[in-house]
Amino acid sequence: MNKSILILKREYLTRVKKKSFIVMTLLVPLMMAALTILPTYLAMMDDKEERTIAVYDPTGLILNQLESNEFTKFHYIPGPEFQELSKNFKSGNYYAVLHIPENILTTNRAEMISDKQVTFDIKNLVTRRIENIIEGEKRKQVIDETGVPDLEKRLSATKTDIRVETIKLGEKGEAVKSSTEIAMVMGYIAGLLIYMFVFIYGAMVMRGVMEEKSNRIVEVIISSVKPFQLLFGKIIGIGLVGLTQIVIWIVLTLVITAGATTFIGQGSAETASQAQNIMSGSQAMGQMATATPEAQNKVIEIIGMIGNLNIPLIIFALFFYFIGGFILYASFMGAIGAAVDSDEDAQQLMMPVMMPLIFSVILLFAVAKNPEGQLAFWASMIPLTSPVIMMVRIPFGAPAWQIILSMVILLGTILGSIWMAGKIYRTGILMYGKKVTIKEVFKWLFYKN
């Protein structure tokens, strides 16, 4: 075991000290923070631009009903000025001209004329406001035609928003509010994280073995280390490299994002207020003002439902299946790297090995729809798919005995896969310039070391 620890340290320290590791470890959080912050910051910067839109409305339906906000102004113009702008747009110094045709109630079409491509926000703002006004006009016409008093209030009273809340009973019979959607999202995220980790760093093990095979110095190591110790140390060492990088990425991304967001928020309080004004301006009849408390309550409710999940179990299972799934597939990848001499051969053998992992991602939706079904049960027991599938089932409250059984089966399979991969590694790492068949690889398993 001491030799495995020495190999682990060598693999870990060698890779962590590489310039590529340091650069990528620092660069990825900066990129993630930039992708998170820059779009919001740039959008807020764009919102400062003032625009004036000329409005020509021969119908009179929206006359003086399009209210201006801090950045977008609406200026109503008469027919002669509209004709002049149609011939010479630049003479009016407007961002665009909004034309409300006389048949808008039947065609539901309006025109926005400009010498440049109108932005999405401006088009969406104008569209939503005109829709509200025209809908109100059409409702008024229907009410006038029917002659029924208070018809609009009666119709509004029929609108119904049904919410089915799910209540989960605990082991002691206590009732806690739960959410199927939150459990599904948690399972999806956990399953995809495991898939990405296993795929990326499992391939790193294979490349590391292939590099050692091309380096004759490894022959000295093989003579003094058992195959199980050698491959086990390599897999755990690279796995710790991956965990180190992921933990640093998460911490740095959160720190950079929080720091940059705070800086932007402190320096742009006025900008944030302006952005809120734009959002409220895009809603008619003051809907945004009434929605804000509801949105806050919804966030609090979601946080509460997340807290009602078995978070300690989810975190423990996430790390267990992270590590277990990685070791399992990394041992297979290590065996592939030892058995081949070229990248082409490695890629051909890699796909069949990774197919169960890819298949488990394909099953995510089906398992989330029915986490208690036979498909979900067996996929969470089979060790090649259990690291992803069981993480989908746990947020839904998978039985404890099934979780324990899945973990035990995975642990047993890991020991067997490392032993098998170690046997292949010891023989294959010394084979040069020869195409290896599957039949020959199976013979390596029974060689006496």
Image: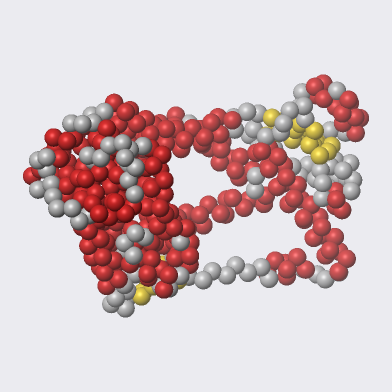
Where's residue 270, x and y in %? 51, 32
Q: In which quarter of the view is residue 83 placed?
A: top right
Residue that appears at 38% across and 47% down: 350
Q: Position of residue 237 (x, y in %)?
A: 21, 42
Q: Residue at x 51, y 71 (%)?
A: 164
Question: Residue at 11% across / 40% down in the picture?
Answer: 223
The relative height of residue 323 versus residue 263 in the rendered view (above or below) is below
- Residue 261: quarter of image: top left
The answer to whether residue 49 is left or right of residue 324 is right
Q: Is residue 184 left or right of residue 110?
A: left
Report whether residue 15 is seen: no
How many circles with numbers are drawn on the protein?
0
Q: Residue at 24%, 35% (x, y): give it.
A: 212
Q: Is residue 175 visible?
A: yes
Q: Nearer the viewer, residue 403 or 280?
A: 403
Does 439 sit above or below residue 171? above
Expressed as whole percent of the image width and height from the top left, the position of residue 322 reads 30, 52
**Farthest residue, direction bottom:** 173
Q: Nearer the viewer, residue 9 or 294?
A: 9
For the residue pair 423 and 28, the one nearer the viewer reads as: 423
Task: Identify whether 335 is placed above or below 377.
Answer: above
| Residue furthest left in the image | 2
How far across and how far down the image is residue 381, in percent? 33, 67
Camera-side residue: 411 or 308?
A: 411
Specify the color scheme.
Answer: secondary structure
Left or right relative to 256: residue 143: right
Q: Quadrant of residue 46?
A: top right
